[in-house]
Amino acid sequence: MQLVPDLTFLKQISDNDMDFIKDVLATFLDEMPKDMEALNTAIEHENFTDIGKIAHKTKSTLQTIGLLELKELALTIEQAIKKGSTEPMLLDQAKSFQQHITQTYPHIQQQINLSN
Amino acid sequence: MKTPTDGIRIFIVEDDLLFAKTIRYILTLNPDHEVRVFKTGKECLNNLHLNPHIVSLDYSLPDITGDEVLKRIKAHNPDIGVIILSGQQDVATAVELLQKGADDYLTKDEANKERLFNIVEKLKKSIFLQKEVETLKEELTEKYQFGENMKGNSPAMQKVFKLLEKAAKSNITVSVTGETGTGKELVSKSIHYNSNRKKGKFVAINVSAIPKDLLESELFGHEKGAFTGATTRKQGKFELANGGTLFLDEIGEMELHLQAKLLRALQEREVTRIGGHETIKFDARIVVATHRNLSELVGKGSFREDLYYRLLGLPIHLPPLRQRGNDVLILAKHFLNQTAKENKLGAMKLGQTAKDKLLSYSFPGNIRELKAIIELAAIMCSGKTIQREDLQFNSPKKVTNFFLEEMTLREYNIKIVQHYLKKYENNIPVVAKALGIGKTTIYRMLKEDEELKSKNV
């Protein structure tokens, strides 16, 4: 699973404005843990609706910072829940998604440090 | 094409803060853009008083649906441009939202710099055009102020102005009658641009100018394939006039079968396009005009009585110019000033001999004829003062001006009767009623005149 962000899009839209890119990455580190905590709660309560909403919400962030495989995973989870699936396998997938997201944090921090 | 260079206020409504920052960054690359970010639909709606020009709206918000936010934005101000940003490619949803008033639909995957910029620029141009249209409409309102384009001090016109004010303040149907060239369309426009419908369209249709087989389609519209030649759907004048004014000129020329359809439309306030099934509601003020005597046409059976009463509304009769006394000179001076300005002729005036000639002429073509006479006189005049010889009266219609000729009283009477017989197509009972004399009196006068003519031969 790709855990290192691909900053191509951010660099392209900002003409390599590193202050902007740092700000975006810092926002990821501020916001994503909150979403993952909410996801954790949803998984514990087997609340598939909330799992689907959080998966949907994270897609645009993951797209923006180039974590495309994780974005596809979020999409898979979202679509399965939309179709009405409540299989235990889906909970495992959501857990795996959450873990992978958490594993990106050091890589994101590293990118921030590199741009200092 | 120019675009507005003063600040464009853009709202971004997006609960994904990172994505919102990205969109904001892209949009603020243009220093003319003032961008605000809101995390929820409610926050956005609570700040609509800041009058954004454009709203970039996430379709899936945590508090209210994007659908609902779109609806309330458009209810607040339909001119706000709304771009829907969605996390998924869904053509059906996109089409539905565009039909509900969204101006564009973009998936978040596609939200790159160029696409966003292009969409925003397109919306800005449309905002600018909208502002231009509003400015033009304000100019039109000034142009059509009562007393600006419509001039006259005669008692007859003072009555008309009072009626116009009443018409403008209400939503009532107005029927305007008067000879050709008396200003029926001008009156209709003045009512529209002085009413609370002035921001809506003024849609005019001259019934006599449209081929009869096309008139129904012009009025009510048609669906694609409704008849040979109907290659696309077309909105009719009723639909186009929604929110504004529909002016039906020369309503007396409408055929009976179409009058029935018109009556139904006016009663139900809805139309169905030819070949269509959907009923379309409309909200337009109706103004009709005719140079003919509609009640007479009702009597002859060529105009429906129920439609006549439906259209009567507030009747405004425009007097012919020959009954407006010194208004001729007021109007002549107005047209002279206008022509001189348009043609850079410098200040011009009417000489006394010109004034006398104008006052003695009957103007069968009314104001339209007066305008043409003055325009020509201004151009052809060698000096700055229009004199008698500069005025050319070339009307194909001859309205007898009795007082230019010397006759006996009997001869005057015959001339008057003959004039009215011509006017009312030899309908003796109508002429008798109009003149307030008996039918036998008319027959006697005509007989006497015939006898006198044969004696003199």
Image (cartoon, rainbow, N blue to C red):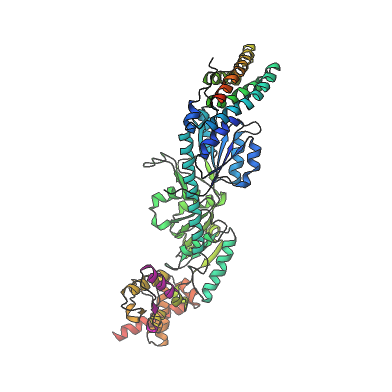
Q: Is residue B418 above or below residue B224?
A: below
* Magenta residues (range): B331-353
Compared across the picture, whether A41 is left or right of B165 comes to right
Compared across the picture, whether A47 is left or right of B210 comes to right
User: Residue at point 40% right, 68% down?
Assistant: B368
Q: Position of residue B453 (x, y in %)?
A: 33, 83
Q: Please indicate, yes or no, whether residue B427 appears anywhere in the rendered image.
A: yes
Q: Position of residue B434 (x, y in %)?
A: 49, 74
Q: Position of residue B239 (x, y in %)?
A: 50, 48
Compared across the picture, whether B308 is left or right of B212 comes to right
Q: Quadrant of the C terminus of chain B?
A: bottom left
Q: Is residue B269 above or below residue B152?
A: above
Q: Position of residue B179 (x, y in %)?
A: 44, 68
Q: Is residue B321 above or below residue B218?
A: below
User: Residue at point 54% right, 48% down?
Assistant: B282
User: Residue at point 38% right, 40% down?
Assistant: B231
Q: Compare residues B234 and A10 and report the one nearer the observer.
A: A10
